[in-house]
Amino acid sequence: MKTFDYVRPATIADAVAAGAQPGASYLAGGTNLLDLMKGGISRPERLVDVTHLNGLDRIERLGDGGMRIGTLVRNADLAHDPEFAKSYPAVAEALLSGASAQLRNAATVGGNLLQRTRCGYFYDPASACNKREPGTGCAARDGENRLHAVLGWSERCIATHPSDFCVPLVALDAIVEIEGRSGRREIALEALYRLPGDTPERESVLEVGDLIVALRLPAEARAFSTHARYLKVRERTSYAFAVVSAGVALRIERGTIREARLALGGVAAKPWRARSAEATLAGGSPNPASFRRAAEAALAEARPSGDNQFKIELARRIVARALALAAAGTPARLPALPASPFASVSGAFA
């Protein structure tokens, strides 16, 4: 690992100023960044430690009924917050399905939003990777690619976004608050991420020095709390990244779906909002036929990027099953294996 400077700013303004310097990276939990540094994938000139900045580790209940989560809140603390878990159960379930308990105790909300892809070629300095080194090519295109993207990919990059947490957040219209050199601004979490196109090295719309300071969930998202689930297929149920996943939230009144929210994970370089599927569900009955139609709509634009045709059908089935589980109602107790299609419902929810 190359040598680097270490900076510990006292204020958010100081952090942004330090983070805007060439070669700077922000350090919070470090569960992804330190791995990248050890492997020589990320080689920052300086680390800007934001872990001691005041006020960024709070879970706040807002006057309008929404919730504001500071960027330094630990994943485990958020998932086990009783009011948060009750209000946004699919998000809590997604959090508890990610990584291991040890990592969830260390990882932060802001770091989760910005974690890098787990593509093996990105992690291998000897392999061609346009995301790591623009213009070198994409070794995954002709390599081991069964777990790669089936939506939104380009010839330059077929990697997927690894976060579980972000999938139901995108479905629920979460907002991120960003502090930058020009002051504070807000954007939809969905708009934070970029598809690879011709510039896969540009993964988000963040500018140099930008620091995510908070995540906000709107009060309107609470209306889905009684019919919300996150479902994830992974190669190792105890802890692994999603092969495919789905975050689903329904508002059902008198046997009719008044509004639906759906996002997919493990299928693209960003959490994938399936608005066409949402539209097919609105106004209809929650039944297997409508769920199958929604699943077809969600994957209508999917195409394999390699040896991963199976992911398209798998994603359809996960969408349909997640919808059925959500329609049946949010469980009063979280499954012992959160988000697993093989789990029975047992164990305390929060």
Image: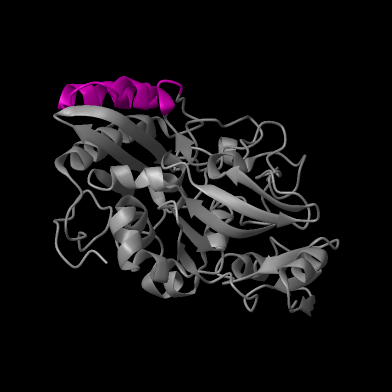
The location of residue 52, given as percent across then percent down, is: 64, 79
Q: Is residue 280 magenta?
A: yes
In which image quadrant can residue 313 be found?
Answer: top left
The location of residue 99, given as percent across then percent down, is: 41, 64
Q: Looking at the image, what colour scheme do you see?
A: one colour
Residue sitting farthest toward the front: 63
The location of residue 276, given as percent across then percent down, is: 40, 22
Q: Main secondary structure of the magenta part?
A: helix
Q: Nearer the viewer, residue 300 or 332?
A: 332
Residue 271 appears anywhere in the view: yes
Residue drawn at x 25%, y 32% is 320
Q: Quadrant of the C terminus?
A: bottom left
Residue drawn at x 36%, y 22% is 279
Q: Nearer the viewer, residue 53 or 31?
A: 53
Asked if 335 appears above or below 232 in the picture, the reply is below
Residue 44 appears anywhere in the view: no
Asked if 180 appears above or below 298 in the picture, the reply is below
Part of the protein shown in magenta? 275-301
The location of residue 98, given as percent across then percent down, is: 39, 60
Asked if 320 appears above or below 230 in the picture, the reply is above
In which image quadrant can residue 8 be found?
Answer: bottom right
In the displayed structure image, the side of residue 189 where residue 227 appears, left or right: left
Q: Is residue 215 magenta?
A: no
In the displayed structure image, the side of residue 261 where residue 287 appears, left or right: left
In which image quadrant can residue 317 be found?
Answer: top left
Q: Quadrant of the N terminus?
A: bottom right
Residue drawn at x 26%, y 21% is 283
How many numbered marks does the figure carry? 0
Residue sitting farthest toward the right: 22
In the displayed structure image, the side of residue 134 where residue 70 appears, left or right: left
